[in-house]
Amino acid sequence: MGIITIYLIFSMLAVIFFDVTRYIIPNWLVASLLILYPVAVMMSPQVIDWKMALIAMAGVFAVGYIVFSMRWMGGGDIKLMTVCALWTGVSALADFIFITAILGGLFAVSLWVARKWLPIYIKREKPWPRILREGEPVPYGVAISIAMLLLISGGKILALGAGG
Protein backbone atom coordinates (compact mmCIF):
# COMPACT_ATOMS: atom_id res chain seq x y z
CA MET A 1 0.00 0.00 0.00
CA GLY A 2 1.47 3.30 -1.09
CA ILE A 3 1.77 6.54 0.81
CA ILE A 4 -0.94 8.20 -1.30
CA THR A 5 -3.37 5.39 -0.49
CA ILE A 6 -2.54 5.69 3.20
CA TYR A 7 -3.05 9.47 3.06
CA LEU A 8 -6.38 9.04 1.31
CA ILE A 9 -7.54 6.50 3.92
CA PHE A 10 -6.50 8.67 6.85
CA SER A 11 -8.09 11.71 5.20
CA MET A 12 -11.41 9.90 4.99
CA LEU A 13 -11.10 8.87 8.64
CA ALA A 14 -10.31 12.50 9.55
CA VAL A 15 -13.40 13.66 7.66
CA ILE A 16 -15.52 11.24 9.69
CA PHE A 17 -13.99 12.51 12.94
CA PHE A 18 -14.44 16.20 12.10
CA ASP A 19 -17.94 15.80 10.71
CA VAL A 20 -19.22 13.77 13.67
CA THR A 21 -17.57 15.89 16.37
CA ARG A 22 -17.70 19.39 14.85
CA TYR A 23 -20.13 19.22 11.92
CA ILE A 24 -17.44 20.61 9.66
CA ILE A 25 -15.22 19.21 6.95
CA PRO A 26 -12.09 21.36 6.96
CA ASN A 27 -11.28 23.09 3.69
CA TRP A 28 -7.57 22.27 4.13
CA LEU A 29 -8.42 18.59 4.17
CA VAL A 30 -10.51 18.72 1.00
CA ALA A 31 -7.90 20.96 -0.68
CA SER A 32 -5.14 18.48 0.17
CA LEU A 33 -7.09 15.74 -1.61
CA LEU A 34 -7.50 17.98 -4.65
CA ILE A 35 -3.79 18.84 -4.71
CA LEU A 36 -2.73 15.21 -4.22
CA TYR A 37 -4.74 13.93 -7.21
CA PRO A 38 -2.32 15.08 -9.97
CA VAL A 39 0.55 13.53 -8.02
CA ALA A 40 -1.34 10.23 -7.83
CA VAL A 41 -2.09 10.38 -11.56
CA MET A 42 1.57 10.97 -12.41
CA MET A 43 2.71 8.16 -10.10
CA SER A 44 0.07 5.66 -11.20
CA PRO A 45 1.40 2.60 -13.04
CA GLN A 46 -1.50 2.82 -15.47
CA VAL A 47 -2.78 5.56 -17.73
CA ILE A 48 -5.48 7.58 -15.98
CA ASP A 49 -8.14 9.39 -17.98
CA TRP A 50 -7.83 12.51 -15.88
CA LYS A 51 -9.79 14.62 -18.38
CA MET A 52 -12.87 12.43 -17.88
CA ALA A 53 -12.25 12.57 -14.13
CA LEU A 54 -12.38 16.37 -14.37
CA ILE A 55 -15.69 16.09 -16.23
CA ALA A 56 -17.03 13.77 -13.51
CA MET A 57 -15.91 16.26 -10.89
CA ALA A 58 -17.56 19.17 -12.74
CA GLY A 59 -20.82 17.22 -13.06
CA VAL A 60 -20.90 16.39 -9.37
CA PHE A 61 -20.14 20.01 -8.54
CA ALA A 62 -22.98 21.25 -10.77
CA VAL A 63 -25.52 18.88 -9.22
CA GLY A 64 -24.04 19.54 -5.78
CA TYR A 65 -24.49 23.28 -6.21
CA ILE A 66 -28.20 22.73 -6.76
CA VAL A 67 -28.41 20.34 -3.80
CA PHE A 68 -26.61 22.90 -1.63
CA SER A 69 -28.89 25.70 -2.87
CA MET A 70 -31.90 23.61 -1.83
CA ARG A 71 -30.26 23.19 1.61
CA TRP A 72 -30.34 19.41 1.33
CA MET A 73 -26.61 19.10 2.05
CA GLY A 74 -23.94 21.33 3.48
CA GLY A 75 -21.16 23.00 1.54
CA GLY A 76 -18.46 20.83 3.07
CA ASP A 77 -20.31 17.69 1.99
CA ILE A 78 -20.62 19.00 -1.57
CA LYS A 79 -16.93 19.98 -1.72
CA LEU A 80 -15.94 16.55 -0.44
CA MET A 81 -18.20 14.75 -2.94
CA THR A 82 -16.79 16.89 -5.74
CA VAL A 83 -13.19 16.01 -4.92
CA CYS A 84 -14.07 12.35 -4.34
CA ALA A 85 -15.67 12.31 -7.81
CA LEU A 86 -12.31 13.40 -9.20
CA TRP A 87 -10.66 10.42 -7.49
CA THR A 88 -13.33 7.94 -8.59
CA GLY A 89 -13.37 9.22 -12.15
CA VAL A 90 -16.11 8.16 -14.49
CA SER A 91 -15.40 4.45 -14.06
CA ALA A 92 -16.43 4.29 -10.38
CA LEU A 93 -18.62 7.40 -10.13
CA ALA A 94 -21.94 5.53 -10.28
CA ASP A 95 -20.72 3.10 -7.60
CA PHE A 96 -19.59 6.02 -5.45
CA ILE A 97 -22.88 7.88 -5.72
CA PHE A 98 -24.96 4.73 -5.17
CA ILE A 99 -22.95 3.61 -2.12
CA THR A 100 -22.98 7.12 -0.68
CA ALA A 101 -26.76 7.38 -1.13
CA ILE A 102 -27.42 4.00 0.49
CA LEU A 103 -25.05 4.66 3.40
CA GLY A 104 -26.37 8.21 3.83
CA GLY A 105 -29.94 6.96 3.98
CA LEU A 106 -29.10 4.20 6.46
CA PHE A 107 -27.12 6.63 8.58
CA ALA A 108 -29.93 9.22 8.55
CA VAL A 109 -32.53 6.63 9.57
CA SER A 110 -30.22 5.27 12.28
CA LEU A 111 -29.65 8.75 13.68
CA TRP A 112 -33.38 9.50 13.58
CA VAL A 113 -34.12 6.33 15.56
CA ALA A 114 -31.30 6.98 18.03
CA ARG A 115 -32.36 10.59 18.52
CA LYS A 116 -35.97 9.58 19.19
CA TRP A 117 -35.43 6.53 21.38
CA LEU A 118 -32.20 7.02 23.33
CA PRO A 119 -33.55 9.86 25.50
CA ILE A 120 -36.58 7.73 26.35
CA TYR A 121 -34.61 4.71 27.48
CA ILE A 122 -31.42 6.27 28.82
CA LYS A 123 -31.61 9.14 31.29
CA ARG A 124 -28.58 11.47 31.39
CA GLU A 125 -27.52 14.35 33.58
CA LYS A 126 -25.44 15.87 30.78
CA PRO A 127 -26.81 16.86 27.38
CA TRP A 128 -26.47 14.33 24.58
CA PRO A 129 -23.61 14.81 22.10
CA ARG A 130 -24.67 17.04 19.22
CA ILE A 131 -24.91 14.14 16.77
CA LEU A 132 -27.57 12.51 18.99
CA ARG A 133 -29.66 15.64 19.58
CA GLU A 134 -32.99 15.87 17.83
CA GLY A 135 -33.16 18.53 15.13
CA GLU A 136 -29.45 18.49 14.32
CA PRO A 137 -28.40 17.88 10.72
CA VAL A 138 -27.04 14.58 9.48
CA PRO A 139 -23.26 14.68 8.96
CA TYR A 140 -23.24 13.17 5.46
CA GLY A 141 -19.45 13.39 5.31
CA VAL A 142 -19.55 10.09 7.20
CA ALA A 143 -21.38 8.31 4.36
CA ILE A 144 -19.24 9.98 1.69
CA SER A 145 -16.02 8.95 3.45
CA ILE A 146 -17.14 5.38 4.09
CA ALA A 147 -18.14 5.05 0.42
CA MET A 148 -14.66 6.19 -0.59
CA LEU A 149 -13.05 3.78 1.88
CA LEU A 150 -15.10 0.93 0.38
CA LEU A 151 -14.03 1.90 -3.13
CA ILE A 152 -10.38 2.11 -2.05
CA SER A 153 -10.55 -1.31 -0.40
CA GLY A 154 -12.30 -2.71 -3.47
CA GLY A 155 -9.57 -1.48 -5.81
CA LYS A 156 -11.86 0.92 -7.67
CA ILE A 157 -9.72 4.06 -7.41
CA LEU A 158 -7.60 3.85 -10.55
CA ALA A 159 -5.22 6.68 -9.61
CA LEU A 160 -4.04 4.50 -6.72
CA GLY A 161 -2.89 1.84 -9.16
CA ALA A 162 -6.01 -0.24 -8.61
CA GLY A 163 -7.20 -2.69 -11.18
CA GLY A 164 -10.78 -1.44 -11.50
Image: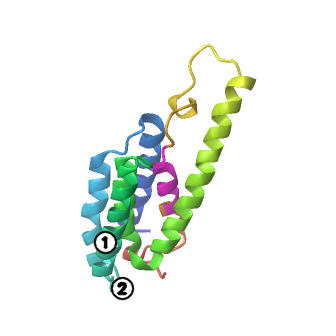
Q: Which residue carries the number 2 mark?
A: 46
Q: Earlier in the sequence, mark 1 or mark 2?
A: 1
Q: Residue at x 43, y 73 (%)?
A: 157
* Residue 78, horizontal then vertical, whole percent: 37, 55
The type of residue carrying mark 2 is Gln
Tell me if I can see residue 129 in this picture: yes
Rendering quarter of residue 59: bottom left
Q: Residue furthest top?
A: 125
- Residue at image mark 1: 40
Marks 1 and 2: CB-CB under 8 Å? Answer: no
Report the front residue among 12 and 139. Answer: 139
Q: Main secondary structure of the magenta part?
A: helix
Q: Is 56 inside the magenta-drawn segment?
A: no
Q: Residue at x 54, y 28 (%)?
A: 129
Distance from Cα at disc 1 to Cα at disc 2: 11 Å
Bounds of the magenta span?
139-147
